[in-house]
Image (tube, grey):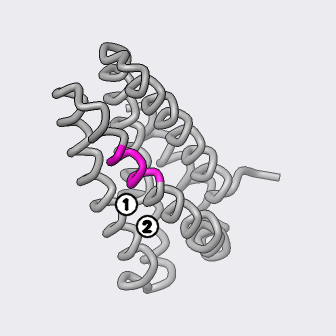
Amino acid sequence: MSETIKSFLTDDHRTCDNQFAALENLVALENWQEATTNFYKFEKELNIHFDMEEKVMFPAFENKTGMSAGPTQVMRMEHAQMLNVVSSMKEDIEKKDKNHFLGLSESLMMLLQQHNMKEEQMLYAMADAHLQEESASIIEKMRELKRD
């Protein structure tokens, strides 16, 4: 069976989650040098993930279904909300403020879990159903963003 949009993006969620968990551990240990490096990796991975959805999958889904004010709009708003938290976390990394960082990271973890659940259980399944014929090319376009 060929790869689905759901399996591709769900695997990418796990990659981001693992990066995030490693980052939290480094901050908790106050290993600021590695935490800083890891933070920028996590931030990049997260931005690439959001780009794969917002620049490739969401537009394809919206064009096919005519739904632009539905689930994709909600996901875009949640992406922006999460990026705001990540931006504040960047300041904490730079200031080496462990406690504030870990407080924000707890909030981000909850936002990510709820967001990922909605995407994985609802939106990705809808995307696979509506975009079956073009899913291979959509996945390839998303892969290209990861390679850049």
Q: Residue at x 43, y 77 (%)?
A: 62
Mark linked to residue 58 = 2
Identify the element where label 2 is drawn. helix
Q: Name the residue under label 1.
A: 54
Q: Residue at x 53, y 55 (%)?
A: 138
Instruction: Kindly give the residue lying farthest to the front in the view shown.
Output: 99
Q: Distance between the residues labelled 1 and 2?
A: 5 Å
Q: Position of residue 2 (x, y in %)?
A: 76, 51
Neighbor class of circle 1 (other Cα within 10 Å; few <14, some 14-19, many 20+) is some
- Say whether residue 18 is left or right of residue 104: right
Disc 1 to disc 2: CB gap under 8 Å: yes
Q: In the drawing, does residue 21 fall left or right of residue 106? A: right
Q: Quadrant of the C terminus?
A: top left
User: Magenta segment range?
Assistant: 103-109
Is residue 17 a member of the stretch shown in magenta?
no
Q: Position of residue 139 (x, y in %)?
A: 56, 50
| Residue nearest the observer in this picture, 25 or 136 | 25
Give above or below for 88 relative to 84.
above
How many C-alpha atoms fall within 10 Å of the one at disc 2: few (<14), some, or many (≥20)? many
**Image label count:** 2
